Amino acid sequence: DAGITQSPRHKVTETGTPVTLRCHQTENHRYMYWYRQDPGHGLRLIHYSYGVKDTDKGEVSDGYSVSRSKTEDFLLTLESATSSQTSVYFCAISGIAGGYNEQFFGPGTRLTVL
Amino acid sequence: AQRVTQPEKLLSVFKGAPVELKCNYSYSGSPELFWYVQYSRQRLQLLLRHISRESIKGFTADLNKGETSFHLKKPFAQEEDSAMYYCAPDVLYGGATNKLIFGTGTLLAVQP
């Protein structure tokens, strides 16, 4: 597996609490992505980053924020968790955008919001 | 609306039977197209990409620009092919940066 780790791997939290998920890479790739995976919806892009301190919204960004202060780390924060944010969250990295845009995925974080 | 459609949530076949997982897209231009696969307890990974015209694990995918389809095919399914398959066009999204847009996925179950 490409050098991508996610932490925590599992988390249970309560509605209204903030949650931060971490993605760490050792590949020095420029692009990093956060997706959520839900039955019937597949993978949906939440936010992405195209460099340190450069981030942008994906298709389901409401209720989420991200930060990237170092090339290797991309943090996803749920500012006030809701039950609709119960999901499996995947981080991905890629060296380039477009063309041969192979993305390498992390193992996922299963988040349950009660 | 621009979208990628995988009409089958579940496709169940017997070992040795042919398999076709459907993917239709409605993005403008000529997006590059990919199939990703997620085996049980493994990470999502690239299976194949159209631009490479390759066959991976016996799978091929044919691009039909007229029908805007990129169906994944295998002549003889094996039990180890059981997995979730995602079609993903690479499209220009929100500016100048390309993104993969994933379909809803098809779960392939190959019965012995």
Image (cartoon, coloured by chain):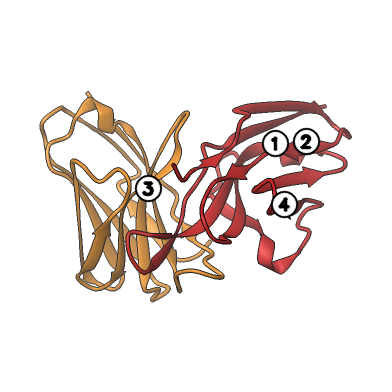
Residue A13 position by quadrant: top left
Colour for chain B in the figure: red
Looking at the rendered image, the quarter that the C terminus of chain A falls into is: top left
Colour for chain A in the figure: orange
Q: Nearer the viewer, mark 4 or mark 1?
A: 4
Mark 3 in CB contact with mark 2 (< 8 angstroms): no
User: Which residue was labeled with disc 3?
Assistant: A35
Mark 1 in CB contact with mark 2 (< 8 angstroms): yes
Q: Amino acid at mark 4?
A: Asn
- In the rendering, at what x and y percent does residue B23 appear? 64, 42
Q: Nearer the viewer, residue B97 or A22?
A: B97
User: Which residue was labeled with disc 4?
Assistant: B64
SS class, disc 3: strand
Mark 3 in CB contact with mark 1 (< 8 angstroms): no
Q: Nearer the viewer, mark 2 or mark 4?
A: 4
Discs 3 and 1 share one subunit: no
Pointer 3 local density, CA inside 10 Å: few below 14, some 14–19, many at least 20: many
User: Which residue was labeled with disc 1?
Assistant: B82
SS class, disc 4: strand
What is the C-alpha distance between the residues marked 3 and 2?
28 Å
What is the C-alpha distance between the residues marked 3 and 4?
28 Å
Q: Chain of mark 3?
A: A
Pointer 4 local density, CA inside 10 Å: few below 14, some 14–19, many at least 20: few
Asked whether, in this view, residue B37 is left or right of residue A87, the answer is: right
- Tag 4 or tag 2, which sits nearer the N-term? 4
- In the rendering, at what x and y percent does residue B75 appear? 87, 43
User: Which residue was labeled with disc 2?
Assistant: B79
